[in-house]
Amino acid sequence: MFLWVMSAVLVLVVGGCVCVVWAARGGPRWARGVAAVVLLGGELVRAGGKRGGGNRRSEDGTFGDGGGSGD
């Protein structure tokens, strides 16, 4: 079941990327609409990542808060 769900998600992601490229080249109106939704979703994911306190890279390229023994 998990494989089917992940396959469907992959198909949707690839289809969204195709619509973004097609819309950039002047595709039909529906492709531009799908591309707008895909790009908006990407912006929302990116904005959500900035607010979260997850394990992200810091300015020096390391993970976490920079504290530690420095081995």
Image (cartoon, grey):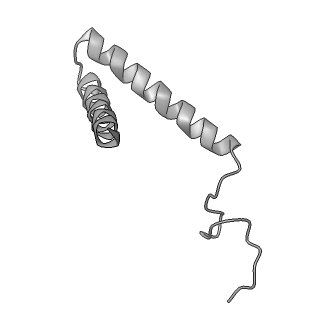
26 over 57 or under it: above or below: above
Report which quarter residue 25 is drawn in: top left
Residue 41 at x, y = what percent?
48, 28
Q: Is residue 39 left or right of residue 34?
A: right
Residue in front for this viewpoint, 36 or 11: 11
41 over 33 or under it: above or below: below
Q: Quadrant of the C terminus?
A: bottom right
Residue 61 at x, y = what percent?
59, 69
Residue in front for this viewpoint, 62 or 5: 5
Judged from this view, the residue extending furthest toward the top is 29
Across the whole image, how many numbered discs are drawn on residues?
Answer: 0
Q: Is residue 34 left or right of residue 39?
A: left
Residue at the spot x=75%, y=85% of the render? Answer: 69
Residue at the spot x=35%, y=41% of the render? Answer: 2
Q: Quadrant of the N terminus?
A: top left
Judged from this view, the residue extending furthest toward the front is 1
Residue at the spot x=29%, y=43% of the render? Answer: 3
24 over 31 or under it: above or below: below
Report which quarter residue 17 is drawn in: top left
Residue 7 at x, y = what percent?
27, 38
